[in-house]
Image (cartoon, grey):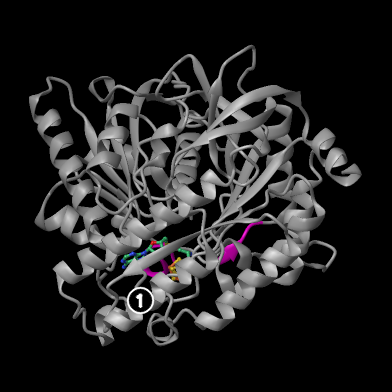
């Protein structure tokens, strides 16, 4: 999933600090536009903070929707809040530690206040650490798992009336929140997430997601298309359809037809020719030729795939239970490049998995050179309780070796990104303007179809415009452009066909 960055969708400063202190996340997120901050008034105010992947950010919009329709308001100021909720991530140990530190800070605030404040933990850590959070550590008043957000109002009322902690961490085989309209309270008004499936059945050896988010289930097609249409009607220009393993989406429609992810994406792309469509996160085993053909056929399905490889050595991939070999992955990359010329690829890589030898680590580096990713999210292996790796394999790569291998991976990716971005100089791209650049109000920023961030002088363009931009300079993280004029996606598609 646009992987694993700690997103605090309510507090931009905290978000920046967090990204800078983190050793294994990518920080190009800092070039994103400042978010519009919409508050919602209500009888009791809720402060909501989000950690982890895009799926968590999307879940927070569901939480906001449930709370708003039950009379709660949303505030960006924790000091004004009656309830502080932290939507958590359990993917790696350092993600959990950060949430614990944040809970300690919230508890310190609570102690100093004259008025009461309830503290709640939502999401993946809630599921994993329910007993610890409630009983041993007495850190929180509310623990709510990712499939129990509809129950939040009842749980809040229960905790309020009894003075006891309220808990629901029941995982569901059906819940997709299909009928809820997410409250996009921290959106830039241009790009939105649309959650299309939940959970994961893959059981990769290192991953806690199947334990914290439960079984895979897909949302009905009609509700997804309706949500995308509503977003277009509200002026949104880009949707990212989300799932933990998004391209294993499958749904049997009312008329009995099976809808695959490729078919769904095709239908979403027809909601509007001016709506850019992205998705995250795909598993290589579910990246079919049919899906690649949708990228090639539909001008508004972006020419970009996040395709997590995790490792470059077949034996390690086998131990990771990824179900593909190095060769199969490289074949897939070759097919993607052949069917979708100019496609941009990004990935996730884990350094120092159980039993990884120096030669196997070198295979990861050589795979990176071969694929030439535009971008990568790179992590040190972190053992997670209950996973296959924790139960059956030895976490035997010493910490300093893991760190050194991670640094080698990061350094290599930086140099690949630098070269790939330098190759963009002189090319033209259609950029969807997201807002002012983080570094200067005199400049705008937005992304190319291939998901590269471009910064350029404002002129008279606005958020939501498609602008033709010529690239004049580049760093490993950002392209610097010169605006050539407004355009539309359809105009650009026709120009390509004629050209
Ligand atoms: N579903 C996606 C896939 O199959 O590739 C990945 C989603 S996972 C939530 C995001 C990323 O976190 C993974 O791709 C992996 O690189 C990283 N990750 C997951 N568990 C990890 C662990 N135990 N240690 C280090 N990184 C981990
Ligand atoms: Fe985790 Fe594997 Fe599922 Fe991705 S596909 S969420 S890495 S178990």
Q: Quadrant of residue 16?
A: top left
Quadrant location of ligand 2?
Answer: bottom left
- The reply to whether residue 143 is visible in this rendering is yes
Q: Nearer the viewer, residue 54 or 17?
A: 17
Q: Is mark 1 within 8 Å of ligand 1?
A: no
Q: Is residue 249 magenta?
A: no
Q: Quadrant of the rendered structure where residue 492 is?
A: top right
Specify the quadrant that holds the C terminus: top right
Q: Which residues are magenta?
A: 209-219
Determine which residue is flagged by label 1: 362
- Establish if 100 lies above or below 388: above
Q: Where's residue 142, x and y in %?
A: 27, 45
| Residue 304 place in picture, x, y as percent | 62, 53
Q: Nearer the viewer, residue 185 or 390?
A: 390
The answer, for residue 252, to whether it is visible in the render is: no
Q: Quadrant of residue 355?
A: bottom left
Q: Is residue 144 left or right of residue 279?
A: left
Q: Residue at x 57, y 16 (%)?
A: 458
Q: Residue at x 78, y 46 (%)?
A: 299
């Amino acid at each position: 999933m646009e992987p694993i960055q700690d997103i605090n969708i309510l507090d931009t400063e905290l978000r920046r600090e967090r990204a800078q202190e983190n050793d294994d996340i990518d920080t190009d997120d800092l070039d994103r536009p400042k978010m519009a901050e919409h508050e919602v008034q209500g009888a009791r105010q809720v402060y909501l903070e989000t950690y982890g992947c895009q799926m968590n950010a999307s879940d927070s919009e569901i939480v906001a929707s449930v709370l708003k329709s039950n009379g709660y308001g949303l505030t960006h100021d924790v000091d004004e809040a009656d309830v502080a909720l932290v939507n958590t991530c359990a993917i790696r140990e350092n993600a959990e530690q950060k949430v614990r530190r944040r809970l300690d800070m919230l508890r310190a605030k609570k102690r100093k206040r004259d008025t009461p404040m309830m503290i709640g933990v939502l999401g993946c850590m809630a599921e994993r650490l329910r007993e610890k959070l409630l009983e041993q550590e007495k850190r929180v008043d509310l623990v709510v798992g990712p499939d129990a957000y509809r129950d939040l109002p009842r749980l809040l009322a229960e905790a309020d009336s009894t003075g006891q902690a309220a808990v629901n961490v029941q995982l569901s085989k059906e819940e997709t929140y299909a009928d809820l309209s997410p409250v996009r309270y921290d959106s830039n008004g241009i790009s939105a997430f649309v959650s299309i499936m939940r959970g994961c059945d893959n059981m990769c050896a290192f991953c806690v997601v199947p334990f914290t988010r439960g079984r895979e289930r897909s949302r009905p097609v009609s509700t997804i298309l309706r949500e995308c249409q509503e977003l277009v009607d509200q002026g949104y220009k880009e949707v990212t359809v989300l799932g933990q393993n998004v391209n294993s989406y499958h749904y049997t429609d009312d008329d009995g037809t099976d809808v695959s992810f490729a078919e769904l994406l095709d239908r979403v792309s027809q909601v509007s020719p001016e709506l850019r469509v992205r998705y995250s996160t795909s598993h290589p085993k579910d990246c079919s030729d049919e899906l690649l053909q949708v990228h090639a056929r539909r001008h508004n399905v972006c020419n970009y795939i996040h395709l997590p490889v995790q490792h470059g050595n077949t034996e390690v991939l086998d131990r990771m239970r990824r179900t593909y070999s190095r060769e199969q992955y490289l074949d897939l990359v070759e097919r993607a490049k052949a069917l979708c010329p100019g496609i941009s690829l990004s990935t996730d890589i884990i350094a120092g998995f159980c039993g990884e030898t120096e030669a196997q680590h070198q295979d990861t580096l050589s795979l990176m050179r071969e694929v030439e990713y535009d971008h990568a999210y790179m992590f040190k292996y972190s053992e997670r309780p209950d996973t296959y790796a924790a139960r059956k394999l030895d976490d035997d790569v010493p910490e300093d070796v893991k760190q050194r291998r991670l640094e080698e991976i990061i350094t290599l990716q930086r140099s690949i990104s630098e070269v790939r971005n330098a190759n963009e100089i002189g090319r033209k791209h259609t950029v969807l303007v997201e807002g002012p650049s983080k570094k200067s109000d005199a400049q705008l920023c937005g992304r190319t179809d291939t998901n590269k961030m471009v910064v350029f002088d404002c002129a008279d363009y606005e958020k939501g415009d498609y602008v033709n931009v010529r690239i004049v300079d580049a760093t490993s993280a950002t392209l610097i452009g010169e605006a050539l004029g407004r355009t539309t996606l359809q105009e650009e598609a026709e120009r390509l066909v004629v050209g």
